[in-house]
Amino acid sequence: MNLLILSSSTGGGHDMRAAALSAWWSESGGETRTLRPLENGFLLYRWGSAFYNLIQRKLPLFHYLYFHFLEWASLHRGHRRILLSGKFAKQVAEFTPDLVLSVHAHLNHGYFRLCKDALPEKRMKFVIFCGELADGKGFSRHWINPLADLFSGPFEETCEAARRRGMPAERTLASGPLLRKPFYNRPGQPSRDEFLAKYDLSPDLKTYVLGTGANGVNRHRQVIEAFNRSGKPCQLLALCGRNESTLADLSRIKKSSRVPFVALPELSAPDMALILRQADCLFARPGAGMTTEAIACGTPVVFDLSRGVMPQETNNLNFWKKRAPSVLSTHNPSRLPELAGGEVPSVKIEMASDPGKLLDALRTLLGK
């Protein structure tokens, strides 16, 4: 059966979930295709996605203005208002999906209708998977389309937020996190000794991981300098993602650093899961993608709120406040040595061996 996934490269969580679902669906014998109509459509939509990522890197607090503008503007809510939609409709018609699933708030109305109009003879099903962890100031109204056949989210808190905004209760499903295969409880997970050997780390030092967003959001240099000043014994793993300039900068200061650290480029899913399972603490933005991965791995987290909090991030902080013993966060990355030295909270959930609850629901919609 053909599954069409609608995604966007704003941040990293949407594409992460799209790639995970594509892999799981293909493994079960289905065909998938992922389309990103914002990045591959009208120039204004491409610019809007790029602008989202720019302010995420430079000034997250500005997202309060951008988020509320998009909530009001409803640029993609009506299918007749979507510009240069012919290319998208043609791609849909060529793939002939039996099921369309969106992982992005702004693809749940107009683009769903364009899919239907592209193949009027097919009775394709429409599903929304929302990666937000709970309700909050950044829970977009565009996530909700009561005409969708199913609204699914990782936790009951997500579904509660959807029902409050008008999604019929009988068509909501708390299906568990949608993640890549290594984040589930599966046999053959690497041990701590394997982790230490892989990254040439000491078994006698605590390991703190400096996280990064998909678009290079990090405060690695400030944190490393703060640990050097503190004199606290530890070792650091600095995740640089695709940010080559940060990777090069850290390589230049490695020999002069008093605290040992390893700067890493973009990691595979198995490596990322290995690191999060073994880390004594993760320092990262409260984005839905990395926060969900930390929850799946039971990783203690200190949240980086420097340069402000995005509205979308408040949703995930609300989930953490509800599920964890406490929340540790800071607007000043230089405080990490002080915060990580104490008790750092984590959220622990029971992970299955796969996202079977979601996959079963999709098959049920298709009558399989």
Image (cartoon, helix red, strand yellow):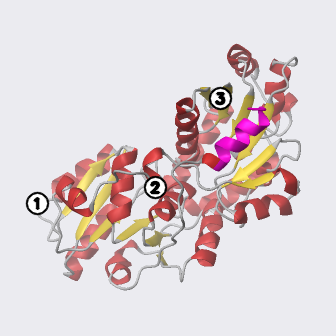
Crowding around mark 2 (Cα neighbors within 10 Å: few <14, some 14 to 19, many 20+) is some
Instruction: Say the numbered circle drawn on residue 43.
Output: 3
Q: Position of residue 305 (x, y in %)?
A: 50, 69
Q: Nearer the viewer, mark 2 or mark 1?
A: 2
Quarter of the image that includes the C terminus: top right
Q: How many marks?
A: 3
Crowding around mark 3 (Cα neighbors within 10 Å: few <14, some 14 to 19, many 20+) is few
Question: Can residue 210 be spotted in the picture?
Answer: no
Q: Position of residue 22 (x, y in %)?
A: 56, 34
Q: Circle 1 sits on which residue?
A: 255
Instruction: Give the amino acid at mark 2.
Output: Asn
Of pointers 2 and 3, the one earlier in the residue sequence: 3
Instruction: Give the amino acid at mark 3.
Output: Leu
Secondary structure found at label 1? loop
Dots 2, 3 in contact, CB < 8 A = no
- Residue 65 quadrant: bottom right
Dots 2, 1 in contact, CB < 8 A = no
Q: Which segment did they paint magenta?
A: 357-368
Cα–Cα span, label 2 and label 1: 38 Å
Picture layout, residue 38 above or below residue 189: above
Residue at x 78% of width, y 49% of height: 142
Cα–Cα span, label 2 and label 3: 42 Å
Q: Position of residue 253 (x, y in %)?
A: 17, 59
Picture layout, residue 54 above or below residue 234: above
Of pointers 3 and 1, the one earlier in the residue sequence: 3
Q: Nearer the viewer, mark 3 or mark 1?
A: 1
225 vs 273, left or right, is left
